[in-house]
Amino acid sequence: MAKGKIAKLVLIGDPKKGKIAAVVADFIRFLKGKADVVANLNIADCSEEALERCDFAVVFGGDGSIIAAARFLSASSVPVIGVNLGKLGF
């Protein structure tokens, strides 16, 4: 990513699980002026179009969600940032 360029992010998380919806909403407010959110969706709804437009994918969830998203996103070569909101954590 070029210096001075604002990062484009895809946010991935299941809003029906625990506190994920609230954490994602707080993160979006934090990002104002720091990064652009290209899409905010569940991993099942992730599209090639969204991935082509982003620099990073930020995954909110437990170990299983982060691993599943990393496996799904590996073909696209999009870097994955995992935010562990689960109980265990590696």
Image: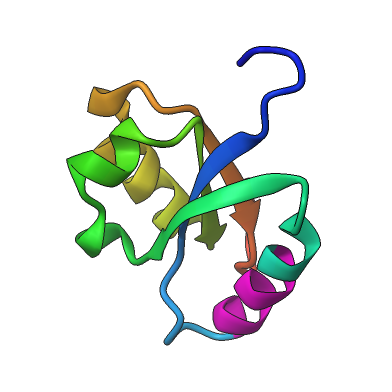
x and y, in percent, of residue 50 in the image: 31, 45
x and y, in percent, of residue 13 in the image: 45, 66
Count of numbered badges drawn on the protein: 0
Determine whether, in the image, residue 88 is placed left or right of residue 46.
right
- In this rendered view, identify the residue nearer to me: 75 or 55: 55
Quarter location, residue 27: bottom right
Asked if the stretch drawn in magenta spans residue 25, the answer is: yes
Quarter location, residue 8: top right
Range drawn in magenta: 19-27
x and y, in percent, of residue 41 in the image: 37, 65
Magenta-colored segment: predominant secondary structure:
helix
Does residue 45 lie above or below 52 as drawn? below
x and y, in percent, of residue 15 in the image: 46, 81
Q: How is the image coloured?
A: rainbow
Does residue 64 lie above or below 13 as drawn? above
- In this rendered view, identify the residue nearer to me: 73 or 66: 73
Determine whether, in the image, residue 49 is placed left or right of residue 60.
left
| Residue furthest top in the image | 2
- In this rendered view, identify the residue nearer to me: 20 or 34: 34
Q: Residue at x 62, y 34 (%)?
A: 7
Asked if the stretch drawn in magenta spans residue 58, the answer is: no
Determine whether, in the image, residue 50 is placed left or right of residue 40.
left
Does residue 69 lie above or below 84 as drawn? above
Q: Residue at x 30, y 32 (%)?
A: 52
Look at the image and tell me in which quarter the N terminus lies.
top right
Q: Residue at x 21, y 49 (%)?
A: 47
Look at the image and tell me in which quarter the C terminus lies.
top right
